[in-house]
Amino acid sequence: MSVADADRRLATVELLGVLAYGQLRAFGAMSAAVRFAPDARAAHRIAEFGDREHAAYEALHDHLASLTDLATAAMDRQKGLFDRFFARAPLDDWFGAMVFFAFGIPLARDFMRTVVQLLDPESGDVVLRTLQDRADVEQAAIALLRSELTDDAARERARHIVADLLGQALTSFQQAASDTDALSVLLGADDDAASVEVRRLAMDLLTAHRGRLVELDLEDPEELTQD
């Protein structure tokens, strides 16, 4: 294995560690929300979502473990960033949980979609399959939140939570990008070019995020096209 190939393998391991630990925390968030469900039907639905999150975690972890004997160590390196993000998750009532599932967790999935192109075909296929297996969960989460947005006060509370989540997500993304050269290695770019690409990735995340705001009438679509 050449030095370049070895560097790419290490960068892939590091990035998969990011995705696997983030996925584990997403499963934990789903599980925590079950107790706030207004009825057994809603609790059952969230439990089903949690099952899919755990299955996605297992797929990412198993692939990561096939690349390194230090899979949990690769995940632990990302623990601080994700723990800070999930600590801001409003999982203390049903409304907050619905906002988080409609906006917070999809932010992580948007990141997965943007970086999958950087991975080797096998790793990229694993990530794509986990996304495809949970595509309907995102739409279901949006539908559940829409049913909670019954008045201006609810919409204003949702906007406040979403703004806080977005700020923390972008801070975590920028911190992760500065703490590791994994993206630079996978991009095959020098520091300056990688910095430009990281900013582009961040803009892609923001565009997808704002699209969800428009879908739920939490932002004016005209404002989206003017930026």
Image (spheres, grey):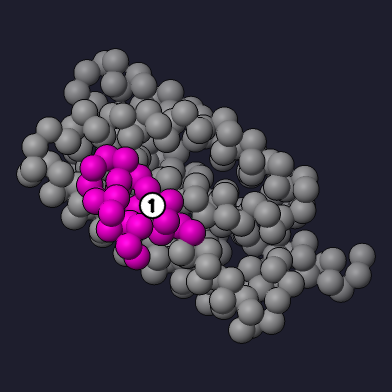
Whether residue 115 is in magenta: the answer is: no
Residue 51 at x, y = what percent? 48, 27
Residue range highlighted in magenta = 204-227
**Mark 1: which amino acid?**
His
Residue 66 shows in this picture? no
Q: Is residue 39 above or below residue 194?
A: above
Where is residue 5, by image quadrant? Answer: bottom right
Q: Judging from the image, what secondary structure is the residue with disc 1 in? A: helix
Q: Which residue is mark 1?
A: 209
For this orientation, the residue located farthest to the right is 1
Residue 137 at x, y = what percent? 44, 31
Dominant SS of magenta comes to helix
Residues 81 and 209: in front is 209
The residue at 27%/40% (across/down) is 216
Residue 225 shows in this picture? yes
Residues 33 and 117: in front is 117
Whether residue 216 is in magenta: the answer is: yes
